[in-house]
Amino acid sequence: MAQSPVHVDTQQTEIRQNKPSSRVMWHMPRHRPHVALTFDDGPDGVVTPQLLDVLRQHRVHATFFVVGHMIAKYPHIVKRIIDDGHAIANHSWAHYRLDEMTQEQVGLQLSSTTQSLEQLNVPMAAYARPPGGRFNNFVIHAAKSQDLTLVMWDVNAADYKSPDGTLPEPSVIQSRVVRRVKPGSIVLMHNSMATVQALPGIIAAIQNKGYQLGLLQW
């Protein structure tokens, strides 16, 4: 799914401060050579295991923003994410545009996902990411009421399908990420076969630049 620019309401909230106390985080601290890989839209039974295989091979931990209604379909994949040392966070229940919902509806999208993970006894990091990066004050307040911080990104791999249904070449994805990454970057990627193919090169190139790859750190 193509990622649109951040919704106009984002600017009106005036929360583009990147402090640990902020309710919306765009990157990690810039003074450490640490980069976080994040993956949206899983889990599934085909792509997610391959992403996990690559991460295991390279001994890298990442954060998976999972879609709630997929959790019950692939509980073994969800548990493997945790067993492999990764973190799981909230990407809403149905991947709808949260900025078109009431605050109560947004709250239900988030809480339903959290409850699905709780039913599996799977820990969830206190982070949420709105689908498409679209949010407004309703989304911010709904997340805050559930003690969740919205985690965005400063590097977009743009590894999703184009309007004609094609995926970008792995080399293009890798180049896009490596060119933009900097200390404290949060890299947005997706549950996509193109990402599976690009991931080994992305990991190697980022590490060759002297960065450490791991979970979100503030």
Image (cartoon, rainbow, N blue to C red):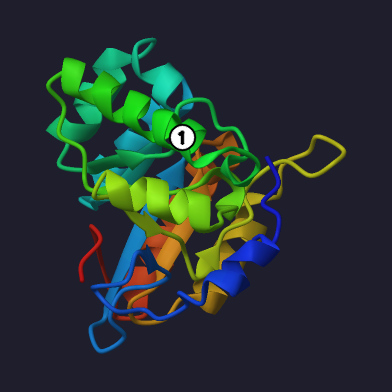
Residue farthest to the right, as pictured: 164
Give the answer, above or below, for where 89 lies relative to 19. Answer: above
Locate the C terminus by quadrant.
bottom left
- In the image, 11 versus 210, the foreground residue is 11
Q: Secondary structure at mark 1?
A: helix
- Position of 218 with respect to 155 (left or right) is left
Q: Position of residue 128 (x, y in %)?
A: 37, 47
Q: Quadrant of the N terminus?
A: top right
Q: Is residue 126 visible?
A: yes
- The residue positioned 51% from the left and 77% from the top of the image is 14
Circle 1 residue: 104
Where on the picture, by quarter, is residue 146?
top left
Where, by quadrant of the figure, is residue 55 drawn?
A: top left
**Which one is nearer the viewer's eye here, 81 or 69?**
69
Give me the residue at 60% from left, 38% from top. 101
Residue at the bottom extreme?
31
* Horizontal relation, residue 59 to residue 154: left or right: left
Check the image and report above or below for 90 versus 143: above
Question: Position of 130 compared to 51: left or right?
Answer: right
Can you give x and y, in whole percent of width and height, for residue 103 in the image?
A: 49, 41
Count of picture labels: 1
* x, y percent for residue 24: 39, 65
Q: Which residue type carries mark 1?
A: Glu
The answer to whether 188 is drawn above or below residue 205 in the figure is above
Residue 97 in the image: state x and y as whole percent. 62, 39
- Crowd class of label 1 (few under 14; some 14 to 19; many from 20; radius 10 Å): few
State the residue at coordinates (35%, 24%).
112
Snapshot quadrant of residue 69: top left
